[in-house]
């Protein structure tokens, strides 16, 4: 079900035109369908991770999964755009409750090589769901029709959710997550963190690249900075009093955890934005139907699933070097995607882009699950839920920032060249400029990975000298 929650971040984008026609939604309401889910997802992650750690990960997972299934039903039968927006927000909360429990349960139930293999499976499913989202969304729209096909995007979650509930009830252990120690929840810290996350993510989620975007939305970042500063001060005092804070900042002293979070945040700032740009170029620039535009990303999904499986096994041997190699392959692959779009004729560009996705996907599988394994390797199982949720929060924040920046550049380029360049040339320029943003973010992840690899090698040499 972790894959389904991520899938809902990408597949719904394809259904927005259908929702617009069916419910008469305007541009801001369509934006809220996507942004509301992402925002609620991010808000729920850390509180749910903390609750799972101190109460029961199994219980929280079952609650989140049940809520996700019910809210998917509410989305599917929504009779107005207002009801759909509310249901999507609640669905995002349910998704945010589930995800930390998945990571915490892996920490709790597996160790060593077994944990690495478990994260390999996790990474493979996340890679498949991210890349298959546009294709699946387009296929369901084609089956259900342009008017109400979008409802199938949510109906599909219901049988999957029910089946997952049955398996989870039978298979997930009932052992309490943290039988000993402080089990307080720090409500003030939770509220401060929620305000900081909300105020930081909101302006990026409301950025479309349109001239109608309000410049005043950036003032939310001031509130985010103030709330974050107060949160850090409160958490420090809370911990000094002998109680367990929402986030124990001592976990950031663990270099593998801190650096892994930074790598993942930069990487996930780029990947969803890259798929969005590719879909926009194929649909709007080349005129492909949604289902065919989505198929271009299938090679990425297939190769990333394979390498994620092997990455879960190889990470124990090669460590951070495997992640660095993966990021290099992603950079090469997406550069080839850009070159295919620029240099190949319109009739064959999609095929060339799909072939280049094979390379990017092969690298992607060596990034996600190995990095997840390395990030949580030194974190105690009792903190697995909240530590994993902080990592997921970084990914959601990165996705919001990266998607906003890349799409804003894409649409701003189209607007600036209105009447100055021919149709396809405009889309070539917009695609290239947006890709420069995403490639820069992936390059940042590469630099962070290289710095961590250098740190490890320096530490190893120092240990040999001692």
Image: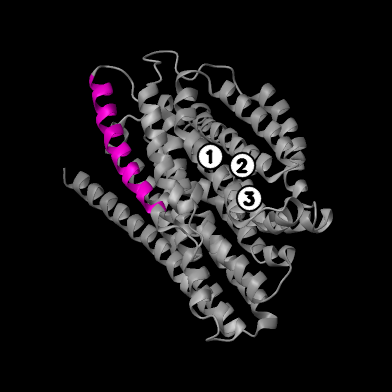
Q: Is residue 255 magenta?
A: no
Work out whether 361 lies above or below 252: below
* Visible residue check, residue 247: yes
Q: Nearer the viewer, mark 3 or mark 1?
A: 1
Marks 3 and 2: in contact by CB < 8 Å? no
Upstream in sequence: badge 2 or badge 3: 2
Please, is residue 184 above or below residue 49 in the view?
above
Q: Nearer the viewer, residue 348 or 299?
A: 348
- Residue assigned mark 1: 41
Q: Nearer the viewer, mark 2 or mark 1?
A: 1
Picture residue at 52% right of the left edge, 74% below the top: 415
Residue at left 31%, top 32%?
231
Q: Which residue is mark 3?
A: 129
In the rendered image, the vertical position of residue 435 relative to residue 117, given as above or below? below
Q: Which span is picked out in magenta?
A: 217-240
Label 3, secondary structure: give it. helix
Helix, strand or loop for disc 1: helix
Horizontal placement of 276 versus 156: left or right?
left
Q: Is residue 225 left or right of residue 402?
A: left
Q: Which residue matches tag 2?
A: 5
Q: List x then y, in percent, for residue 374.
A: 41, 43
Element class at badge 2:
helix
Q: Where does residue 427 sit, x and y in percent of width and height?
A: 57, 77
CA separation, marks 2 and 1? 9 Å
Quadrant of res 60: top right
Q: Position of residue 238 (x, y in %)?
A: 28, 22
Q: Whole-Å distance between the Cαs marked 2 and 3?
A: 9 Å
What is the magenta segment's predominant secondary structure? helix
Residue 124, visible in the rendered structure? no
């Amino acid at each position: 079900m972790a894959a389904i929650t991520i899938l809902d971040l990408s597949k719904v984008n394809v259904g927005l035109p259908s929702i617009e026609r069916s419910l008469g939604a305007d541009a801001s309401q369509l934006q809220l369908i996507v942004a509301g889910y992402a925002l609620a997802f991010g808000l729920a992650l850390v509180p749910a991770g903390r609750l799972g750690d101190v109460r029961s990960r199994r219980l929280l997972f079952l609650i989140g999964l049940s809520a996700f299934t019910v809210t998917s039903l509410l989305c599917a039968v929504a009779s107005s755009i207002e009801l759909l927006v509310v249901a999507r927000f609640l669905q995002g909360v349910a998704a945010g409750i589930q995800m930390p429990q998945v990571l915490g349960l892996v920490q709790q139930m597996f160790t060593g090589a077994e944990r690495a293999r478990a994260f390999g499976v996790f990474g493979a499913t996340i890679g498949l769901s991210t890349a298959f989202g546009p294709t699946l969304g387009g296929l369901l729209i084609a089956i259900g029709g342009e008017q109400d096909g979008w409802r199938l995007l949510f109906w599909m979650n219901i049988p999957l959710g029910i089946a997952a509930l049955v398996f989870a009830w039978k298979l997930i252990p009932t052992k309490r997550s943290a039988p000993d120690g402080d089990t307080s929840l720090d409500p003030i810290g939770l509220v401060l963190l929620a305000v900081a996350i909300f105020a930081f993510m909101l302006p990026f989620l409301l950025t479309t690249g349109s001239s109608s975007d309000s410049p005043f939305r950036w003032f939310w970042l001031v509130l985010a900075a103030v709330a974050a500063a107060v949160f850090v001060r409160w958490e420090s005092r809370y911990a000094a009093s002998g109680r367990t804070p929402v986030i124990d900042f001592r976990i950031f002293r663990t270099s593998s955890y801190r650096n892994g979070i930074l790598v993942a945040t930069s990487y996930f700032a780029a990947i969803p934005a890259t798929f969005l740009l590719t879909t926009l170029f194929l649909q709007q620039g080349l005129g492909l139907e949604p289902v065919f535009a989505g198929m271009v990303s299938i090679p990425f999904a297939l190769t990333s699933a394979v390498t994620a499986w092997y990455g879960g096994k190889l990470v124990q041997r090669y460590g951070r070097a495997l992640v660095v190699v993966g990021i290099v392959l992603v950079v090469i692959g997406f550069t080839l995607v850009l070159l295919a779009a620029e240099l190949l004729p319109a009739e064959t560009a999609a095929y060339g882009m799909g072939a280049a996705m094979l390379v990017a996907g092969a690298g992607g599988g060596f990034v996600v699950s190995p990095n997840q394994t390395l990030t949580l390797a030194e974190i105690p199982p009792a903190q697995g839920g909240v530590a994993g949720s902080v990592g997921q929060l970084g990914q959601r924040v990165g996705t919001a920032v990266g998607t906003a920046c890349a799409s804003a550049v894409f649409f701003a380029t189209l607007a600036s060249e209105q009447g100055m360049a021919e149709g396809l040339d405009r889309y070539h320029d917009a695609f290239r400029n947006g890709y420069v943003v995403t490639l820069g973010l992936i390059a940042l992840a590469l630099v962070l990975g290289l710095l961590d690899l250098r740190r490890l090698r320096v530490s190893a040499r120092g240990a040999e000298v001692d």
